[in-house]
Amino acid sequence: MQEVTATSRHYVDRLFDPDPQNVLQGVIDMKNAVIGNNKQKANLIVLGAVPRLLYLLQQSSSSLELRTECAVVLGSLAMGTENNIKSLVDCHIIPALLQGLLCSDLIFIEACLRCLRTIFISPVTPVQLLYTDPTVIPHIMSLLSRSQHTQEYITQIFAHCCKVAHTSHIVIMFFLAYENAQVSMTLVNVLVDGEQLSQVFARMMQRDKPIEMQLTAAKCLTYMCRAGAIRTDDNCIILKTLPCLVRMCSKERLLEERVEGAETLAFLMEPDIELQRIASVTDHLVSMLADYFKYPSSVSAITDIKRLDHDLKHAHELRQAAFKLYASLGSNDEDIRKKITETENMMDRIVSGLSESSIKVRLAAVRCLHSLSRSVQQLRTSFHDHAVWKPLMKLLQNAPDEVLVMASSTLCNLLLEFSPSKEPILESGVIELLCSLTQSDSPALRVNGIWALMNMAFQADQKVKVEIVRALGTEQLFRLLSDPDTNVLMKTLGLLRNLLSTRPHIDQIMSSHGKQIMQAVTLILEGEHSIEVKEQTLCILANIADGNTAKELIMTNDDMPQKIKYYMGHSNVKLQLAATFCISNLIWNEEDGSQERQDKLREMGFVDILHKLTQASDPSLCDRAKTAMQQYLA
């Protein structure tokens, strides 16, 4: 025993050597000595090796190699007895190792994580030490993808910490499962006493459990479901999580519980129409949410004056949560939207919400409005009756980008041709506003600006079209046609297509801007673009070919017929169809100069191509080619 102790003291003494190289060698020798030797580990701990190793590990003046070797030795000491673990924890090893994870060196990070894994899987380690600092979990999450080892150690740490099924400890799950498929898949397979974690959470949502526990478990399962680890039709979601969250929305619950319940439920069912339908018929949820706007409903009901004061100050959070949940409920189903708009004073409440002082309430209200604006029926009735376009237009003035994106998306729907709001919005000077959105740095705002203009131009009279071109300016229009965002490009092509419809409009716009438009069409047809982009561009070309004078811009451009010919022989049917439509419009018999155009295109080999396409396997392409051929035979 004395011999082992003497050797152990020698190892500890070397940690204090003034020569860094000797210290490093001493740590390496210590590492080799403790492997598989519990007695040696216990001796080194008793002799005070741990505080010195932790000091060296944390010193920025220590070399990375020394810091890494210190982490390895500490990990080895942790693999001894439970008493060893207790001693290490008492020396504050966990904060030191967590601090070490901030280093950029992967080998050192892996050594720290390996040691943390050994410490946390011990039953004597208090797991809450992992999440005393709220910045720790997000940082550990960011290390998941660094290597196979980091992934392995982190998921083992998490899996163990999640086995402690007490509410205060599973708060960690909020950080973990939120929109993270990798972690969620790990967690869903964790067994707690032979039972899956999802079943443990389902039991925690029983009505006799504390409300905090029910809500926490429901949130965990919601995040795991949204991350794809649990199916939306799983019983633990449909029969447990959803009903639990609906219960949290009842007026018997505290304000914070009602807010959390509604917001979590909105997140759970956001992408899933079946969950939306189930929720809409559970416990009269749609009408229950109307109470969120009358809070507190009765002063006498709340006897605690401090509580009443708190609730009055935070009542806007209820309104925000209700709008979010209504938005989620009504995002897909027409019947649910109708039910929402028919709820007492609902449209008035949304209109009021659009001008509330709280930016969060305004955003939630406009999200709700956007969800309801997907309904043709509501656009024609409730939206028109309540003139919602007025507060919406007001909201678009100097709002933060997040609000602007949602408000402009809603405006796109209000500008559809069947919307009665379209005319008054046009008269309010909206074109300038939308044109300014197309110059935003945000792709989402550029898309919405151009999308709204596209909707406005659909079947519009010439005056509106001319105003759009004037306000947007050809320079900006062509800048948008080379936008790096495909959505912006597609909507700009859609706008151009709508502007170039009906012959007088086509000829008028092409007489002013024909050269630039043909140049833009050429660039897109020659560029590296998707099938959808090229199809839309060929449709624009077909519209130009339908103009009386505009079609000459194609005929006098030697390059353009060659491009049409190329796309008629393309492997994609959509492109063949659009290109054949161009030719059909160019050779149409009843128009001036059709004979000359037919002759010129015959010389270029188009009749042979059309003849070949009449044998095409696609019936639409075959029919279109036959229709074009008839022009030659008439």
Image: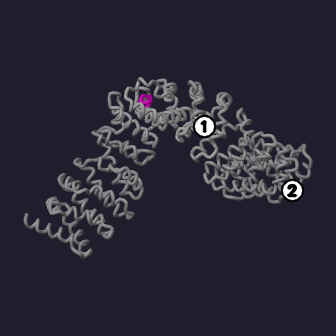
Q: Residues within 10 Å of mark 1 (few under 14, many from 20)?
A: many
Residue 231 vertical position relative to residue 132 in the rendered view, above or below: above
Q: Looking at the picture, how far across and down is residue 483, in whole percent?
A: 66, 55
Which label sits in the foreground, 1 or 2? 1
Name the foreground residue: 608 vs 62.
Answer: 62
Task: Give the residue pinned by disc 2.
Answer: 603
Q: Secondary structure under badge 2?
A: helix
Q: Looking at the picture, how far across and down is residue 342, in whole percent?
A: 59, 24
Name the foreground residue: 305 vs 223.
Answer: 305
Question: Callout 2, which amino acid?
Answer: Glu
Residue stretch in magenta:
244-249
- Residue plotted at (19% across, 71% down): 14
Can you tell which quarter of the image residue 7 is in? bottom left
Task: Give the residue pinned by disc 1.
Answer: 370
215 in the magenta segment: no
Q: Are marks 1 and 2 in contact (CB under 8 Å)?
A: no
Q: Secondary structure under badge 1?
A: helix
Q: N-terminal of the two: label 1 or label 2?
A: 1
Residue 614 vertical position relative to residue 391 in the rendered view, above or below: below
Task: Check the picture and name the quadrant holding the N terminus.
Answer: bottom left
Q: Is 484 placed left or right of 507 in the picture? A: left
Name the foreground residue: 434 vs 633.
Answer: 434
Question: Callout 1, which amino acid?
Answer: His
Q: Decide whether the magenta segment is chiefly helix, strand or loop.
A: helix
Can you tell which quarter of the image residue 43 is in? bottom left
